[in-house]
Amino acid sequence: MSTNDWETVIGLEIHAQLATRSKIFSGSATAYGASPNAQANLVDLGYPGVLPVLNAEVVRMAVMFGLAVGASIAPRSVFARKNYFYPDLPKGYQISQFELPIVSQGSLDIVLDDGERKRIGITRAHLEEDAGKSMHEGLGKFTGIDLNRAGTPLVEIVSEPDMRSAKEAVAYLKKVHTLVRYLEICDGNMQEGSFRCDANVSVRKRGASEFGTRAEIKNINSFRYVEKAINYEVARQIDLLESGGKVVQETRLYDPDEGETRSMRSKEEANDYRYFPDPDLLPLEIDQAYIDQVRASLPELPDQKAARFSSSYGLSDYDAGVLTAGRDLADYFEATAAAIASSPPSAEHAKLAANWVSGALAAALNANNLEITASRISAPSLAALLRRIADNTISGKIAKDVFEEMWTSGREADAIIESKGLRQITDTGAIERAIDEVIAKSPAQLADYRAGKDKLFGYFVGQVMKATGGKANPAQLNELLKAKLIASPD
Amino acid sequence: MFKKTLAELARGLRAKEFSSVELTRALLKRIDESQPALNSVISITADSAMAAAAAADGQIAAGTAKPLTGLPVLHKDIFCTKGVRTTCGSRMLDNFVSPYDATVVARLRQAGMIMLGKANMDEFAMGSSNETSYFGAVKNPWNPALVPGGSSGGSAAAVAARLTPMATATDTGGSIRQPAALCGVTGIKPTYGRVSRYGMIAFASSLDQAGIIALTAEDAALVLNVMAGFDPHDSTSVDAPVPDYTATLGDSLQGLRIGIIQQFFDAGLDPAVAAAVRAALAVYEQLGATLVEVDLPALPLSVPTYYVVAPAEASSNLARFDGVRFGYRCQDPVNLEDLYKRSRGEGFGAEVKRRIMTGTYVLSAGYYDAYYLKAQRVRQLIAQDFARAFANVDVLVGPTTPTPAFALGAKTADPITMYLNDIYTIGANMAGLPALSIPCGFAAELPVGLQIIGAHFAEARLLNVAHQYQLATDWHRRVPLVWAE
């Protein structure tokens, strides 16, 4: 049997940390990186007698997410206690939502390799508090507990088992990642753990209607690891089944150093969480007026924006997709395109801006590990450069050099063009003179060209460009050169 | 001085008949001397009390005093008190000094009251006799061989012995009313949500309610005026205006419709207790009230329902006592599991462990629907019974307990017998209703409590009904002989 005989089934549980200033049930700050326990008050520490009070901002953010994925918002949702003992869980229970989550039955579309769209169902999204962290390093035989993270608001987004490959899982994960950052409800930082995911993975014979036994993989904190961990797990399960074994339902941990998943605990060892409604918190009631108010505050969503970029600017689906991957990137693109000449920009200017933002600028940002918001070249400055391409002051090739100079020196495009004399030569006479000189110096090549070696045309272009310092207008050069080469010698 | 009610003491302070320092010193001495006989307190906060009393005298002299400035209060040791040991009657918190004040404590402090100390109680408020306290049983001031009731046994015994005119208390299934009845004092459990639970160590969060044990309904009204009200720290506290509970105490009872709960006059009711209650009802008729028989068919289910809901919530509420951050930690744990098992095994007493185990069981996979979910449905039925009754009557009246105080040790071997002590009180907790108990006579020389239950937020009505009775009778003035001097 080969891998092709098996079908992979994947569902993701994504934990997105909500970008509130204070915790879900207490007034402590949620900022990352504070010294241990500096951001843990008596409520976070689970002191005797303290009570939780729900942060309204958390509700608003969850409702935003729900509306953005076309889900229903529960008019009444209930916080429940998930009971288990662990030192970084101060109360001995986590406040979560169980039977009645705030968001249910939404979906997101992903684009597959062949360009087809696929709809991934979102079963539910519920609110819960994060636990703290255990620290094992530098404390000898002791374990330290840092409760700064305890009580940080999370929305857990549970998908349907709708994905059929690691690639699809990554596409869906990226889609959610883009969405939560568009909504500004999560900073999406995977390294700091603000956005993390567990994957439920199983395999079954192609054509089978029943799902196979699944394993839940935890601790996958980058897009790359999601793909690797799932692929490893799929191969492991197929190997196991083909060699006559059985997949056991269990929780497995992904080890990025070894590139493998390892068993953490089996189903038999799993806790009985004894969920029950938290009597310290009243059921959360949300009315239609509130939902309407949140809906009115929603920004343009990634898919809507991409569709608009395609229809208004004539961008390809691919370009539109790339430029809408982040809200700041899309804003930068639009600001650039509109500042070249006119707002709204022409299709030609939009395409020019699209190429440069997703090309040279993206490369420079990437090389310097910068976010678009920290770009050394502002949108108006980039537009000023593109304006000089559009009006034929400089060629695209020269513009690359100007761009480099702008990036390193911070100077404006026009100043660089003037001071370095980079203005394109559009004077027909000057270009003709340069052509004549090159032809005069290249009798052998001329003869060959006229004898039929068309490829030598490039040689002449190169020589003329060299002679003009790259400033000859390429279109004019082509036209004039063709005429001169064909013309018979006087 | 020590026999005076809170209202009388307030007038005395204002008239400069005595100072808060004199009053506080006298009561602290009385508490100290009573300890070997009653064991009603766990901590005495003499130094801070004397300092606060001196400050109160200054305010009284300067004319800046509030109505309760300089008056004493004893706090049940379930309320967190900043900088003061807060044990909840448990070895688990023997060493716990709270870093903050419960809202109830803070409000009474801001009102100018002087904290004398912390009252003894059943461990984590789990008990009906005060015998589960890690700090030893409290004795009944009427007879030291008998229990004072629980879980607020220390609060009730201290008020009955006139060690303090008033104490805070909490009631989850009768823990204010039952000891108030057994000690012959006045105790009120307000509507669930009327008083903040913040800083009150949780037993069963959906049932717990803070309240007052005092000598009279008038005194309870004075204190409830400052204790009640919305607290942004407690999501289950109700954001509704607080009336002046003293304003309506004098209202006539002419035309009052009193419902007599048939289910309370059952076979388990001591005939002498029944006689005292019937006599009290006759007093109410003389005051102009009409009596109506009321049927609450689901009420007999309240005890078994309670012993599913309360332990379930307790099993979760008490999970935080794990030896990691505060409280008791076992010696030299070898690993995490050992730390958990021995810290909790050694830190909790038998009754607390019994309820944690019961609660864990009823919430477990496969049992949740049959126990916890069903109990919540029965709770709805009980609440509906009450709601129907209040469509026809103003208050419901009956005995607080089936019997007067019983002997120490008499019921400790059989938890079920002990649990049945709360058979008449649990219903009000199940439905979240306000209820109070006032002394209404004696059975075999032991006080009998009359329970009055009201509709939600009808505290003013309850206190009015109790006050009018206390104007017509003097049971609340009776002092146990040995504590009369």
Image (spheres, coloured by chain):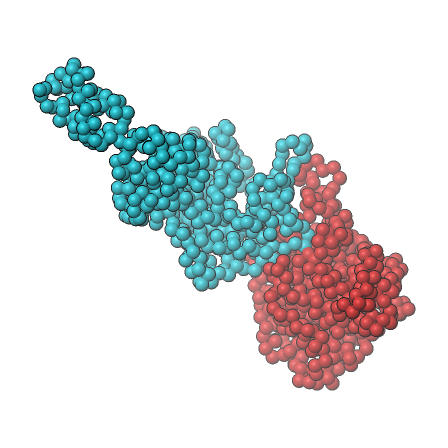
Chain colours: A cyan, B red
Relative to B191, say whether A264 is above or below: above
Answer yes or no: is residue A31 visible. yes
Horizontal and vertical percent position of residue A386: 31, 38
Residue at screen point 38% across, 45% down: A331
Tell me how many marks there are: 0
Relative to B372, say whether A3 is above or below: above
Q: State left or right for residue A198 relative to residue B158.
A: left
Q: State left or right for residue B221 relative to residue A459.
A: right
Relative to B217, say whether A280 is above or below: above
User: Front-most of A411 and A15?
Assistant: A411
User: Front-most of B97 and A101?
Assistant: B97
Residue at screen point 66% across, 40% down: B337
Residue at screen point 82% across, 65% down: B57
Location of the C terminus of chain B by quadrant is: bottom right
Horizontal and vertical percent position of residue A239: 42, 30
Q: Quadrant of residue A238?
A: top left
User: Front-most of A484 and B272?
Assistant: A484
Q: Quadrant of residue A489?
A: top left
Horizontal and vertical percent position of residue A94: 58, 49
Residue at screen point 74% across, 42% down: B330
User: Front-most of B47 and B343?
Assistant: B47
Q: State left or right for residue A212 relative to residue B368.
A: left
Q: State left or right for residue B45 relative to residue A270.
A: right
Relative to B261, say whether B128 is above or below: above
Location of the N terminus of chain B by quadrant is: bottom right
Answer yes or no: is residue A165 visible. no
Horizontal and vertical percent position of residue A58: 52, 53
